[in-house]
Amino acid sequence: MGKIMWCLSKKEGLSFVEPNQNLANAYLLKSEQALESLRINTIKDWRIATAYYTMYFAVYSLLMKIGVKCEIHSCTLAFAKEFLSAYFTKEEIKFFEDALQARTDTQYYVNREVPDEQYAAMVKRAPEVLVKCKSIILKLNEKKVREIRDALGKEVEKKKLMLS
């Protein structure tokens, strides 16, 4: 939970907003658009970026459904790791984290290479992640959303106690 505490302390980190199905749908659309870009793009660096954003926007749609805002990608993934473990395996979370690193390496550095195996896995798994997130959204009923929000709320309270 150390990463969650750090994310709660950042202005752009984790915070509560109203759960919003419309925003969840909008982020799913952004994910679908990124997937379309992935399909038509031929440049490896841009395919890595669009594969990553296909997955990221799909995961972020879950946060919108739950009512959690986050502008730090690593914090979005930390939230998924801690609060969506009923839906994502540890291997899937590690894959998302590695995809974030691959996207960062190709977008911000000219001397970092993403291994061909990782590149191929990102391209292959991006549409699967989108489908999985759509399925999770259908399973996230009000009771489950409340449970997840309550769990994050406990972390917010711990953070407040630490600061007082």
Image: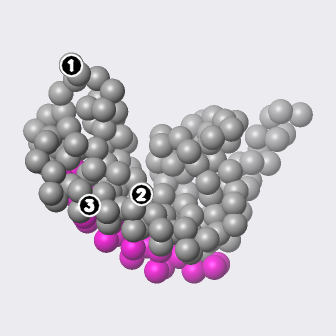
Q: Earlier in the sequence, mark 1 or mark 2?
A: 2
**Looking at numbered disc 3 in the image, what kind of residue is underneath it?**
Leu
Q: Which mark is residue 57?
A: 2
Badge 3 density bin: few <14, some 14–19, many ≥20, Cα 10 Å: many
**Looking at numbered disc 2 in the image, what kind of residue is underneath it?**
Phe
Please state the extent of the stretch shown in magenta in the rendering: 121-143
**Looking at numbered disc 1 in the image, what kind of residue is underneath it?**
Asn
Q: Which residue is mark 1?
A: 111
Q: CA distance from mark 1 to mark 2?
A: 27 Å
Is residue 84 placed above or below 2 in the rendered structure? Answer: below
What is the secondary structure assignment of the residue under circle 3? helix
Q: CA distance from mark 2 to mark 3?
A: 10 Å
Q: Which residue is mark 3?
A: 35
Q: Residue at x 10, y 39 (%)?
A: 116
Q: Quadrant of residue 145?
A: bottom right
Image location of residue 109, percent across then percent down: 28, 23
Q: Residue at x 11, y 47 (%)?
A: 42
Our reading of the magenta stretch's main secondary structure is: helix
Residue 103 in the figure: left or right of residue 39: right
Is residue 93 at least partly visible in the picture? Answer: yes
Q: Quadrant of residue 97?
A: top left
